[in-house]
Image (tube, rainbow, N blue to C red):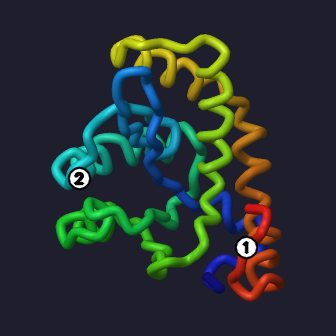
Amino acid sequence: MNKLVDAKDWESVLYTDEACIQLPVHCANLQVASPIAHVVELDISYYRNLLHEQIEITRELLLLPEKVWFVKDGAPAHRAEETKAVVKELGLDDLGHLPQSPDLNPIEDIWAVMKRELHKNPTSSVEDLKQKLVKIWYSIDKALGRKFTMSIPGRLESVLMQKGGHNKY
């Protein structure tokens, strides 16, 4: 993690993660890569296509620099050799993710915002959920995402202070 030193450095990181959004009947997996939101069953084929189709759009929308660090967790689709090849092909630098490391990904804060918004007007339809999630995603103030991203140095400091133990993040 010492590759990114200053808070400003973290603006060149593309975060990916998935969240489980509960419907009254079943759970749908939400896969997000930056500002692109889809409700899908995450597998390697979908993930590869997502990266190929969306990375340039994402770079443009977020005004990401040419050199982009890519953060992913230990999900099987993320660890697959095919995914590693696509990440390399797209010129993304893999920031890496040690097994059982603390999850400091600021996108977790975005999930919390989205889930709060969904609770205000719940749905039982997967199709309605998809529409609401995309609408909520695009309504989130970019300044809020930037605030979460700029908190990374503090998150890292908290982990160090707690010697890897529980912290507020």
User: Label 1: which residue?
Assistant: 166
Is residue 67 in sight in this rendering?
Answer: no
Image coordinates of residue 139 in percent, x first then y, are 64, 22
The answer to which of marks 2 and 1 sits earlier in the sequence is 2
Residue situated in front as seen by the camera: 117 or 14:
117
At mark 2, the secondary structure is helix
Left or right, 19 with reference to 65: left
Residue at 27% in and 50% down: 47
Image coordinates of residue 35 in percent, x first then y, are 51, 37
Residue at 66% in and 77% down: 4
> In the rendered picture of this protein, how many numbered marks are placed on residues?
2
Type of amino acid at the residue the image marks with label 1: His
Q: Quadrant of residue 105?
A: bottom right
Residue situated in front as seen by the camera: 39 or 16:
39
Q: Quadrant of the C terminus?
A: bottom right
Residue at 46% in and 77% down: 96
Type of amino acid at the residue the image marks with label 2: Arg
Residue situated in front as seen by the camera: 84 or 155:
155
For residue 31, above or below residue 1: above
Left or right, 26 with reference to 145: left
Q: CA distance from mark 2 to mark 1?
A: 34 Å
Q: Quadrant of residue 53?
A: top left
Q: Residue furthest front?
A: 25
At mark 1, the secondary structure is loop
